[in-house]
Amino acid sequence: MAKSILVLAEQLRGGISDITYEMLGAGRAIAQALGVPLEAVLLGSGTSQLASSLGAADKVFVADNPELDLAAPETVAEVVKTLVDKTGADIVLVGCTNVSLGIGSILAARSQMPLVNFCRAIKVDGGGLVCTSQLFGGKILSDVKLADGRGIIGVYPGAFPIEQGRSDRTPPTEAIDVSVQPSKIRFKQYIEPASGDVDITKQHVLVAVGRGIQTQDNVQLAEELAQALGGAVCASRPVIDQGWLPLTRQVGKSGMTVKPRVYLAFGISGAPEHWEGMQNSQCIIAVNTDPKAPIFDGAHYGAVADAVELLPILTEKVKMRKG
Ligand SMILES: Cc1cc2nc3c(=O)[nH]c(=O)nc-3n(C[C@H](O)[C@H](O)[C@H](O)COP(=O)(O)OP(=O)(O)OC[C@H]3O[C@@H](n4cnc5c(N)ncnc54)[C@H](O)[C@@H]3O)c2cc1C
């Protein structure tokens, strides 16, 4: 029987990251099913103020210490282990993000707890937990049972709704005093990605183009539809590799993860590496000339049609509708 659930809250540059709310929402559902408290731990500078936005947790442990800002995974793992030893938390949720990846495995080794990484779903099964882990970039989903209900769960970003982890409630906090051991790895500088372009992760509507768009000139057809819909254009990797759009517009494994309300995919086959970056879109509409294109297996709506022919017709229809 689990004692408590601990979420390792993630903050970046003075703000709580979305993954934190995803984990709090997922953690709350498990805590409710198991009848145990949900706690969070927040490390870094300014944590005292940020902790107030973690009201989905029953309690937040805070270590307000600039030495813990983007600290090395081994340093964070040590702090979390100390807390796990103190509270007896037997389920720990950690984000599989660029910031937190690596912490879970060190924590698992040091605390002798099993680790399941890249979890897209978690369900309570009897007294234990079944975690659906994504392997090989999404080609395989594996259900892993944490038999005695104890373990570290690496949460895949974008897999759980953010809203369920948000709360207006101010949680009780407890300051924790931690001694930070010097690490061989130190955070030196945050390098901003190239700016000046649209942030596709913040768009409600995305018009995505793949190799099926055929020419650079045809990308303009997608731009026009995106403009009419109030969205932005993004692309699969071959389009970026051709230099038809900047890297900031690439969706997928080696690009951005997006979750718009509507994702229109024109001439995209639906390779796992692309699917990985857009599968959590609320509504996926695919247009492809090949009725057997894999994207149709996951899309909510699909049309077997020529993207180059259909794009201007759609733009025209949207403009007419908008008057
Ligand atoms: C390590 C690694 C990382 C990767 N990361 C990414 C990533 O981040 N993002 C990404 O996208 N890919 C990534 N890839 C590449 C990925 O495997 C695919 O090759 C890529 O997603 C395919 O892009 P596509 O669907 O545009 O092209 P294709 O697979 O060539 O598909 C083109 C589609 O267009 C259709 N088509 C052709 N003409 C038309 C037309 N006139 N109208 C409508 N449809 C038409 C075809 O039927 C076809 O289905 C990665 C690969 C690796 C190995």
Image (tube, rainbow, N blue to C red):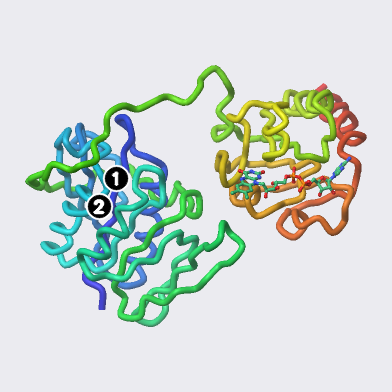
| Residue nearest the viewer, comparing 105 with 14 | 105
Q: Are marks 2 and 1 in contact (CB under 8 Å)?
A: yes
The tag on residue 40 is: 2
At x 71%, y 57%, the residue is 298
Q: Is residue 87 left or right of residue 69?
A: left
Which class describes the residues within 10 Å of circle 1: few (<14), some (14-19), or many (20+)?
many
Q: Secondary structure under badge 2?
A: strand
Examine the rendered structure and indicate whether residue 217 appears above or below residue 210.
above
Q: Is residue 224 left or right of residue 96?
A: right
Inspect the image, locate mark 2, and give the three-letter code of the amino acid beneath it.
Ala
| Residue nearest the viewer, comparing 98 with 35 | 98
At x 41%, y 52%, the residue is 96
On the image, numbered disc 1 is attached to which residue?
Answer: 54
The Cα–Cα distance between marks 2 and 1, rounded to whole angstroms, is 8 Å
Could you tell me residue 15's position as x and y percent? 33, 33
Which class describes the residues within 10 Å of circle 2: few (<14), some (14-19), or many (20+)?
many
Examine the rendered structure and indicate whether residue 170 appears above or below residue 309.
below
Q: Secondary structure under badge 1?
A: loop
Q: Is residue 15 left or right of residue 211?
A: left
| Residue nearest the viewer, comparing 183 with 192 | 183
At x 72%, y 34%, the residue is 239
Q: Earlier in the sequence, mark 2 or mark 1?
A: 2
In terms of image quadrants, where is residue 139?
bottom right
* Quadrant assignment for the C terminus: top right
